[in-house]
């Protein structure tokens, strides 16, 4: 290997350097001469000799590849090259399109070893914008490589595959594209969810805060011996629930297992005169209130509600039964302003695609065992999405034609096939991740005609009933428990938030003034002042970021915009083009400032109301509230 390449690899990837240093000579790969005098690589695979580049004219072959991409690639667009080979295509694409940066993916260490005997990464200017060099010899290394390349950018790079790799490394290329597309899909879903709910999560948490101060925390304020090693049935709203009502009635009558409903399942159970031991809910949307409309209309007081702290605030209003809560990972307010009198740390529920997954986390933390899934289809049945007794004006139980067209097959609990969709698969994958960490628990999936769920045992509920012990459930498990939060700590934190309210408004205005100064400086072409303005702006922004108000409210309510802005500004931070850098900073900060102002105005008045409530219940009516 050329010495210069060792220097570059020591900086870019020590792992590759160590791998190549310990690599034994490979007789299956060697450098050979092409007809035009250039080098190519011969690789022997499955007793067949194949070539990475043309054996006649690699230069002409690469020129044709560049032309193929000319219409689809834009200048300065980042690239990921699949296949290093001898780098001919990389040099040609860099020369033609001048990508802002590029990364290289190689699947064979021996190819790299041969290439580095004739390619000088340090002296060849084509590699000056190399971001990452990946050697992927195991499937488990694919996703980390993808994350390194695309996790810090807003727009995914284009991918260029060396044609010979599609043939020689067909399986490896397929794995890479599969994981790349899956990651982009998950990232899109994450962004969509964040955009939709980032302000709603925080506003709900703010509106719900008084409920946390008057209801017990499920994970801290109960005697866990009531739950430990007791069977719990997690009842979801899937269509297979229709086949289990009689079994659930018997379990309820025998008190042989705790029955917990999640989401809309509560309405199917009520319709069949089954009152669960609790109904769990966490959906942040306004529509979530309709899930509990039947309970409110009928004035049912015998079903406790266990709610996530960021649940749609309308859900909690006028609920007739007892309530307990748990804190969710989307609730930044509780994370910074609540302290328990007994526990140093309060367990939370990590946000998940469905309330069933959230509830599974909670049942695991409470040490229920076994946990029995009922109605957890993750699939359709007879073109139905819910069990009977669940009807909403906003969501029809019957699938429409478009939904049927998009449905696809997945393995069922009995090895057959059932129809599902992307959303169900995402939920199932998320649940399986939680289940993979529950090695000490037995989880049964009793859902007939449901999707197969890893880390569960399929067993029909009729059989499980015979194994349960009567009178296991403690009636009225939620009775006189009280929250045990430290009110002095809470009052102190909220006093600080109220005190910072006016300061925050001034800090945002101050940041905006410096953004305007940067714009004025660019327009007047006084570029020598820009460096000082950039530095001062950074200082002003950091002052804002360090406030409790920002950490509690603005960071959570503008996380999507902040991530986008951070990536855009990072991309020009070291740029020598001061005018373009300034324009990017002005544009991005204006977007962020606008979101800060909207978020500030949304929570300002409600903060005063909550603080006033805290003063009242803590017996301290002193202090300036407004």
Image (spheres, grey):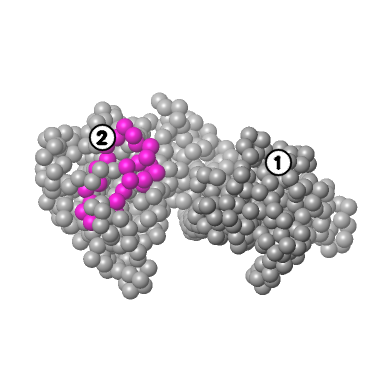
Q: Quarter-wise, where is residue 473 in the image?
A: top left
Of residue 453 and residue 571, the one placed in the foreground of this image is 453
The residue singled out by tag 1 in the image is: 9
Q: Which residues are magenta?
A: 431-455
Q: Which residue is depicted at the point 65% across and 70% down?
A: 68
Q: As drawn, is 102 to the left or to the right of 398?
A: right
Q: Does the magenta segment cover residue 496? A: no
Mark 1 neighbour class, 10 Å CA radius: few under 14, some 14 to 19, many 20 or more = some
- Which secondary structure lies at badge 1? helix
Mark 2 neighbour class, 10 Å CA radius: few under 14, some 14 to 19, many 20 or more = some
Distance in Å between CA atoms under marks 1 and 2: 51 Å
Count the marks: how many? 2
Q: Which residue is depicted at the point 60% across and 52% down?
A: 43
Q: As drawn, is 521 to the left or to the right of 387?
A: right
* Residue 167 in view: yes
Q: Quarter-wise, where is residue 126 in the image?
A: bottom right
Q: In front of the other: label 1 or label 2? A: 1
Q: Position of residue 330 (x, y in %)?
A: 47, 46
Q: Position of residue 458 (x, y in %)?
A: 23, 46
The residue singled out by tag 2 in the image is: 369
Q: As drawn, is 112 to the left or to the right of 282?
A: right
Of residue 537 and residue 187, the one placed in the foreground of this image is 187
Q: Which residue is depicted at the point 37% across and 55% down?
A: 425
- Which secondary structure lies at badge 2? loop
Labels 1 and 2: the sequence-earlier one: 1
Q: Residue furthest top?
A: 342
Q: Quadrant of the C terminus?
A: top right
Q: As drawn, is 362 to the left or to the right of 35?
A: left
């Amino acid at each position: 290997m050329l010495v210069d390449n060792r220097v570059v690899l020591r900086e870019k990837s020590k792992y590759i350097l160590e791998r190549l240093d310990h690599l034994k000579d490979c007789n299956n790969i060697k450098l050979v001469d092409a007809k035009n005098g250039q080098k190519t690589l011969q690789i022997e695979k499955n007793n067949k000799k194949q070539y990475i580049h043309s054996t006649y004219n690699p230069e002409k072959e690469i020129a044709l590849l560049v032309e193929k991409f000319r219409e689809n690639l834009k200048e300065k667009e980042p690239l990921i090259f699949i296949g290093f080979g001898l780098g001919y295509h990389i040099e040609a694409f860099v020369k033609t399109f001048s990508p802002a940066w590029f990364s290289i993916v190689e699947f064979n260490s021996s190819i790299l070893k041969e290439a580095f005997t004739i390619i000088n990464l340090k002296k060849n200017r084509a590699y000056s914008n190399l971001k990452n060099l990946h050697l992927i010899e195991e499937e488990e290394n694919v996703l980390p490589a993808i994350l390194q390349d695309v996790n810090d950018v807003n727009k995914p790079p284009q991918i260029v595959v060396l044609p010979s790799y599609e043939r020689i490394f067909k399986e490896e290329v397929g794995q890479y594209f599969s994981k790349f597309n899956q990651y982009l899909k998950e990232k899109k879903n994450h962004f969509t969810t964040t955009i939709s709910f980032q302000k709603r999560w925080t506003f709900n948490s703010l509106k719900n805060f008084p409920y946390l101060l008057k209801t017990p925390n499920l994970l801290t304020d109960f005697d866990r011996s009531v739950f430990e090693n007791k069977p719990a049935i997690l009842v979801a709203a899937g269509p297979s629930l229709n086949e289990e009502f009689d079994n659930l009635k018997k379990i309820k009558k025998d008190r042989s297992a705790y029955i917990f409903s999640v989401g809309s399942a509560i309405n199917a159970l009520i319709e069949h005169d089954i009152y669960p031991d609790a109904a769990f809910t966490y959906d942040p949307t306004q529509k979530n209130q309709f899930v509990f409309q039947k309970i409110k209309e009928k004035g049912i007081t015998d079903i406790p509600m266990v709610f996530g702290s960021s649940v749609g605030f309308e859900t909690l209003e006028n609920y007739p039964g007892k309530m307990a809560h748990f804190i969710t990972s989307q609730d930044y307010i509780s994370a910074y302003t609540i302290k328990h009198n007994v526990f140093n740390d309060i367990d939370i529920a990590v946000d998940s695609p469905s309330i069933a997954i959230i509830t599974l986390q909670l049942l695991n933390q409470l040490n229920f065992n076994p946990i029995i899934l009922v109605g957890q289809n993750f699939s359709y049945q007879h073109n139905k999405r819910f069990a009977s007794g669940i009807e909403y004006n906003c969501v029809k139980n019957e699938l429409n034609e478009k939904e049927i067209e998009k449905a696809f097959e997945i393995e069922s609990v009995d090895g057959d096939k059932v129809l599902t969709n992307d959303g169900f698969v995402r939920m199932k994958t998320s649940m399986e991740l939680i289940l993979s960490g529950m090695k000490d628990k037995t989880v049964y999936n009793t859902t007939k005609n449901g999707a197969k769920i890893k880390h569960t045992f399929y067993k029909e509920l009729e059989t499980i009933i015979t194994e349960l012990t009567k009178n296991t459930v403690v009636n009225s498990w939620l009775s006189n428990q009280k929250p045990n939060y430290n009110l002095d700590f809470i009052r102190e934190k909220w006093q600080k938030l109220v005190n910072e309210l006016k300061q925050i408004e001034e800090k945002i205005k101050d940041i905006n003034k410096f953004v305007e100064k940067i714009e004025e400086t660019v327009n007047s072409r006084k570029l020598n002042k820009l460096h000082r303005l950039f530095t001062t702006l950074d200082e002003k922004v950091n002052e804002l970021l360090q406030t409790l108000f920002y950490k509690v409210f603005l960071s959570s309510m503008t996380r999507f915009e902040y991530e986008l802005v951070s990536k855009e500004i990072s991309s020009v931070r070291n740029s020598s083009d001061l005018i373009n850098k300034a324009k990017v900073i002005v544009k991005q900060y204006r977007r962020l400032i606008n979101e800060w102002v909207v978020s500030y105005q949304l929570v300002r008045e409600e903060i005063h109301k909550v603080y006033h409530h805290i003063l009242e219940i803590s017996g301290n009516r002193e202090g300036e509230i407004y």
